[in-house]
Image (spheres, rainbow, N blue to C red):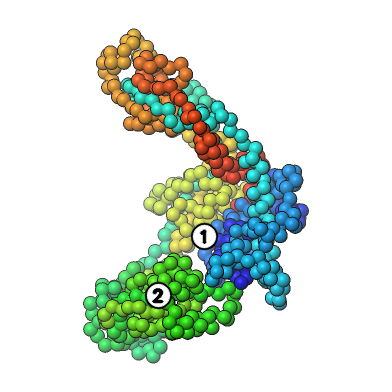
Amino acid sequence: MAVIGKIRRHSALIIALVGLSMASFVLSDLFKGNFGGIPDLAVIAGVEIDPRDYEYRVQEGIENYKENSQQLNIDQSTIDMIRNDVWNQLLDSVILGNIYEKTGITVSKEELKEMTWGKEPHSTIVKAFTNPKTGQFNPADVVEFLKTMDNDPSGKTRARWLKFEKGMIKERYKEKFYSLIKKGLYVTSKEVARDDEDKNKRASIRYVVKRFSAIPDSLIQPAENDLTAYYNEHKYEFKQKPSRSIEYVVFDVLPTPDDTLDIRDWIVKKTEEFKTTEDDTVFIASNADSPFDDTWHKQGTLSAQFDSLIFSVDTSTVFGPYIEDGAFKIVKLRAIAMRPDSVKARHILLKPKTANDTTLRSKADSIINLIKTGRDFAQLAQQLSEDQGSALNGGDLGWFAEGTMFKSFNDTCFAGKKGDIKIVNSQLGVHVIEITDQKELVKKVQIGIVDRKIEPGQKTFSEMYNNATRFAGENNSKDAFLSSAQKDGLDKRNASNLTNNDLGLPAIESSREVVRWAFFEKTGIGDVSQVFECGNKFIVALLNAVNEDEYSSLDAVKERVVTGARNDLKAKKIIDEIKNNDDNNLDDFAKNMNLEIQTASDITFATAFIPGIGREPAIVGYIFSRSVQPGKMSEPITGRQGVYIVTVESNPEYTPPSDLTQNRMSLVQNYHSRVDYELFEALKENAGIKDNRYLFY
């Protein structure tokens, strides 16, 4: 039983434990100095990251992903995910690697042995080397694997193991460091008691509120000095990353009537050829946009375009052309058969332990022989099947319809008969299947579809590209860009606060290059871009704004500032009005101010939430202040929605529980749960990271 086989089949293990970048702890071995004029990909805590080192790890991550997912090609979004994972691994290795060295954290050879085959082996080792028949882990199996892994002449087995081993070591380093931090967190008895009080002491209030919305905005116009004062007081709210704002014109490349006619003429011609072809599968593979599907269908499960007719015609009949789902289609009836409406079966799944495991077929034959000699199928499934979900039920899969299982599995179950026991190969491994029941036979058909999407042709693409190129060439200034876009009625859109690592523009596929252009050093405010091809669109962009400051400017957040400053002025006006009222009784005060008294109960300090109002921290702070007197009217309190007058009706004395042990454990656990994320975020903040990835990707 080889761990590498399991590692290969579980991509999550590679991604989460080993890490796609395989970043080493010895930084001098990984991060070569900059040479040849190539800019650094990044500078992290003073360490220069060579883009070639980064790209090497990205490509290694891509190959790992392909191997573990058994895919030859992966899409751009997956590649972007891998690049981001590699980046995070670099941050981890550089930032934490320095700390490991300073704190003296190490992983000894003896410790590594203990993690591999000792008394407390790593959980992944245990999982990979547990015998599926006995459910027991045997360290001797690990030792045997390590002794024999060099029998692989390609060296791949050893290479995979070393990567896995590095992942375990890296995980242990991090565990030790974070454990040091967590062990240093101490919670005093007073903290525990205060936390319990904040969560469990409950108050009830009566209050009146004059909301800011009661004063029309038109009556309160903040002056410039009011806006400046509010902005400076709340500047922390306007912290930002470096960003760009653009306007852009979209030239949609859509099929013209001529394109549609060309595709219709093509499909009409193919209709006659489809009727007479001798090999439907080859014809479909050569001509259709969609792959051949040999699923059997019963009536009511096919397209309404031909479902009611195809069950009453002869084979080789062709329907169409017709339009469906944005494509011209023709359909041919290939075969008719009476097949079960649905099937009930149970199975025993045997998964390969290595990439070229040749023992599964003989194991399956042995299981069938056991069944023939009287052994119970359900009991064998519980003991031997590696499909844990069905094994608990004796391998029972219940009823399933045609086309819902792997093709080989499906065909065996629907072509066989009740009581058959068969061996079938699938993507998961080898199955021993017993067909336990079948419903009545119904007529089913197998069809072939030739489809061609209605898409713009090359001529249409060229014409639209020429239009976009002409626009970019004739309107290379801000005024000309905006004037022509409006005059010509073009589709102009905005994208604000783009950051250099945004993957693209909103709802525009493959538009990463537009973002990169906006951040190029030579791109200035008012510049107009070249033409970008983004899927079925061409885009020309105008750079509107560049924000490099740590905080958004007053102009950029003026709408928010005006609202906040106006509410401050409204609060002053309301407070002046309240001060002219000398009532000391909330009922009299409410009556004279023409305000409604409201109540709220079960208020706790921990939530800062008042039922019926929402979050009002200032009000909650007053309610639980030590000097508050029950029944006495508060001074005016400015909240988020208005100005409040509050009387605390019930705020009982807090008596802590006699035993706060569980409370202490809960609070400590809460602190510990925050360490992993918050500590690393703080370390990143202090690392002085200069991220130049946008120059390369």
Q: Depth check: give the residue in front, 351 or 612.
A: 351
Q: Amino acid at mark 2?
A: Arg
Find residue 687 and report its horizontal and vertical position in percent.
67, 42
**SS of the residue at dot 1?**
helix
Q: Quadrant of the N terminus?
A: bottom right
Q: Are marks 1 and 2 in contact (CB under 8 Å)?
A: no
Residue 306 falls in image quadrant: bottom left
- Residue 255 x %, y %: 38, 67
Could you tell me if residue 513 is visible in this image?
A: yes
641 lies left or right of 470: left
Marks 1 and 2 sit apart, C-alpha to C-alpha, by 38 Å
Name the residue at 70% across, 73% down. Answer: 148
Instruction: Give residue 346's mark.
Output: 2
Q: Nearer the viewer, residue 686 or 508?
A: 686
Residue under pointer 1? 77
Circle nearer the viewer, 1 or 2: 2
Residue 234 on image: x %, y %: 51, 28
For the residue pair 625 and 562, the one nearer the viewer reads as: 625
